[in-house]
Amino acid sequence: MTDDKYIALLTSTEIIQWMAKHFTDSVVHFEDVRVKELLTKGKNYFVTFVDEDASLYHIEELFERYHTRGKKLQAVIITETGDRHGKPIGVITHGTYLTVIRKIEFPACELLLTKSRRSRRLTHKSSSSLYTNSSLTISWLN
């Protein structure tokens, strides 16, 4: 952020592309990599801004509106007033949105990856509530 305002969105796509270009001897070195090196010049993602009082229903409408236009809204940036030049205080990504939709449409079954020293397995977890311990993450920036 410059002057406490949004300037760019870094996604996993840029990180993976950078890794592919800089992969040497089965090692990727991140020690001296700066975020600006990972940003794709000229790449503009669809992002929009909402105020902190926006409803989750409104957020869903925003993602759906972009989808019906054949575009992918990558993130909803939350500012105090919804002004794009305001200081970002949170972000809801496309992935977070998809997690919410999955939980709404399929609340009774949640796939969990459990790890142990000897094995990894997928298990089903019964969910009696939409708001269980989940992977839903809304990142707050301070």
Image: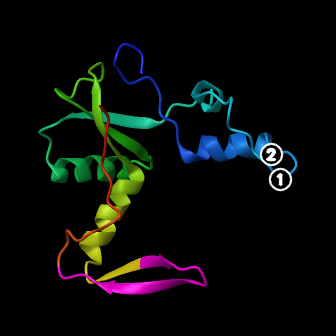
Residue 49 is drawn in which quadrant?
Answer: top left
Residue at point 66%, 47% (across, down)? 16
The quadrant of the image that shows the N terminus is: top left
Label 2 crowd bin: few (<14), some (14–19), many (20+), radius 10 Å: few
Q: In terms of depth relative to the viewer, which is nearer, 31 or 70?
A: 31
Residue 124 is drawn in which quadrant?
Answer: bottom left
Residue at point 16%, 36% (across, down)? 52
Residue at point 74%, 40% (across, down)? 29
Identify which amino acid the numbered label 1 is placed on: Ser
The quadrant of the image that shows the C terminus is: top left
Q: Position of residue 7 (x, y in %)?
A: 44, 23
What separation in Å lies between label 2 and label 1 (alpha carbons)? 6 Å
Q: Position of residue 35 (x, y in %)?
A: 58, 29
Residue matched to label 2: 23
Task: Give the main secondary structure of the magenta stretch.
Answer: strand
Residue 76 is drawn in which quadrant?
Answer: top left
Q: Position of residue 54 (x, y in %)?
A: 15, 41
Q: Which label is found at residue 49?
A: none
Q: In terms of depth relative to the viewer, which is nearer, 20 or 70?
A: 20
Check disc 2 and report its element: helix, strand or loop: loop
Identify which amino acid the numbered label 2 is placed on: Phe
Report the side of 34 relative to 55 (left or right). right
* Magenta range: 112-128
Tags 2 and 1 in contact by the CB under 8 Å rule? yes
Q: Which label is found at residue 26?
A: 1
